Image (cartoon, rainbow, N blue to C red):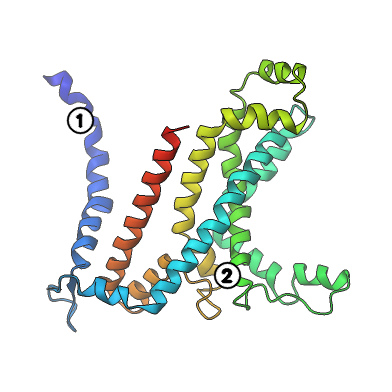
Amino acid sequence: MKRNLTPYFFLTPALIILTIIVFYPAIQAFSLSFSQFGYDLTQPPEWVGLANFKRLAEDKLFRQTMINTLIYLVGVVPPLVILSLGLAIVVNQKLKGINWFRTAYYTPVVVSMVVAGLAWRAIYWSNGILNQFLFSIGFQSGIPWLTSADWAIWSVMIVTIWKGLGYYMVIYLAGLQGISPELYEAASIEGSDGWRKHWDITVPLMKPYIFLVAVISALSATKVFEEIYLLTQGGPRNATKTVVYYLYEKAFRDLDFNYASTMGLVLFSLILVLSIVNLSASRKV
């Protein structure tokens, strides 16, 4: 009996910490979604049922943030899945100095998002590096990377892709190093050489890793916040405002915790459905 309880003694400290910082706040947020604070925040909230969800359904700005989040999801995930795989294939070659290249490509992952955000803001300035390059090749005017509603969200996506490439590259690299070189040799004998061998051998064997990267990057894209906060703060004209950033504004700027909890519950449902779909698809591979 004592032996059977031993694993639970080891798990108890972690469970206590998770209960305090994850499970209890999650239950509280769920409860707040169906209630409303009065003018006195020290008093218990009043139960209002589905009133917050009705308000959410009528909120045009929330619908826009949902659209922005989906655009971000579609714009970020495919490049991360494809480019990081290509990068992993390149750095998996036995070349002189390849470890230096691996380190260089992974460096953005360990750079603080605050530092990266400030650096990219300088790059995107009206007289920043990018626009100076455009001027040097004959453009008469620069591109308003962060001040135009048409360009801003794509500019922020580039930062997310740049920051995540190295991380997903390492995941792919672990899978690539498990593929036997004999398979590539056999493919070469059959006439599959160059990049063709990667389509015939690498991609089929890397499908579990591809789905893993797709799931992780999709979850990260739906929860994007730091890039938005540092680069655009949801502007211009709410063009880059995502659900998480809108939730942050309602909770910590407007102190509307009930409405923010309602948005959090909707976002949780979206992420849950997305995860189930991805995992179901991965089992069929």
Q: Earlier in the sequence, mark 1 or mark 2?
A: 1
253 and 184: which one is in front?
184
Percent from the top left, x then y, of residue 180? 63, 18
Q: Which mark is residue 132?
A: none
With respect to residue 75, does 62 lie above or below? below
Q: CA distance from mark 1 to mark 2?
A: 45 Å
Observer-nearest residue: 26 or 89?
89
Residue under pointer 1: 8
Identify which residue, 259 or 271, lies in the foreground: 271
Crowd tier of the residue under label 2, counting other residues whose Cα lies within 10 Å: few below 14, some 14–19, many 20 or above:
many
Residue 168 placement (x, y as % from top left): 57, 42
Q: Are marks 1 and 2 in contact (CB under 8 Å)?
A: no
Q: Secondary structure at mark 1?
A: helix
Q: Is residue 80 visible?
A: yes
Left or right, residue 67 beside residue 119: left
Q: Is residue 249 left or right of residue 85?
A: left
Residue 112 can be seen in this image:
no
In the structure shown, which secondary structural element does the residue marked by tag 2 occupy?
helix
| Residue type of the residue flagged with mark 1 | Tyr
Disc 1 crowd rating (10 Å Cα; few below 14, some 14-19, many 20+) is few
Residue extending farthest bottom: 39
Q: Which mark is residue 231?
A: 2
Residue plotted at (84% across, 79% down): 140
- Quadrant location of the N terminus? top left
